[in-house]
Amino acid sequence: MSVRIGVVVFPGSNRDIDAVNALEVAGAEPVSLWHEDVSLDGVAGILVPGGFAYGDYLRAGVIARFSPIVRAVRAFADEGGPVLGICNGFQVLLEAGLLPGAVRVNRGLRYVCRDIYLKVESAETPFTLLYEPGEILKMPVGHMEGNYTAPPEILAELERERRVVFRYCDAAGRVTDGSNPNGAEHGIAGIRNPEGNVVGLMPHPDRCSEELLGNTAGRKMFESVVSALAIR
């Protein structure tokens, strides 16, 4: 029996179909969850996809945090359920307080849409267990507000507790200013919560999950959570 994983859909979501496809490729059964739903329909995991939730009015993710489905996702996460936020989904998780910090407009004040490299800093989450620490991945990004920031004490805490999951780097794995596409503090591309069950990242693993797309670097992220849930 396939693992059922919910894909949250807001008005303005545009990567939910990519998320559904990536989950199917990984062997999961995707379940679409509308923003007005108050129930998660018994799913075992949650994916909050990319797009422009509620048009990104005011700022990215800030309106979505008040939706009924996000209240249900918060309760699910509090009980240890695995939750992944991709791009706009990461922004929603930040605004909802499920992850610390915030994202600002990219340095240079331009939308960034291209392939980048990132390093796996932690394989200790349900979404990264099939990766190797230090593994270099090539993934696309597409965002205007991906410049991650947090107060100095939070950044120090993330580093100390090894909660940075992905970091921008070059093809050789060097973390340099030139390899950082948006100006994110410490080159942070993705983080996790203290328990490790909530992960958010700006790059798009859903857009590099099968051979047809010319890149399969993101597939392991979805296969990881399917494997983790199958063990549970």
Image (tube, rainbow, N blue to C red):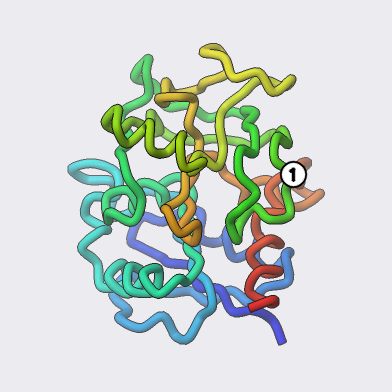
Of residues 36 and 1, the one nearer the viewer is 1
Residue at the spot 67% in from the left edge and 73% down from the top edge: 28
Residue at the spot 28% in from the left edge and 46% down from the top edge: 56
Quadrant holding the C terminus: bottom right
Count of labels shown? Answer: 1
Q: Residues within 10 Å of mark 1 (few under 14, many from 20)?
A: some
Secondary structure at numbered mark 1 = loop
Determine the image quadrant of residue 166. top right
Q: Residue furthest front?
A: 160
Residue 22 location, x and y as percent?
Answer: 66, 60
Q: Is residue 45 above or below residue 211?
A: below
Quadrant holding the N terminus: bottom right
Q: Which residue is mark 1?
A: 132
Of residues 99 and 14, the one nearer the viewer is 99
Task: Using residue 129 as the reference point, say whether residue 86 is left or right of it.
Answer: left
Residue type at mark 1? Glu
Residue 125 location, x and y as percent?
Answer: 58, 56
Residue 127 location, x and y as percent?
Answer: 61, 57
Residue at the spot 50% in from the left edge and 73% down from the top edge: 6
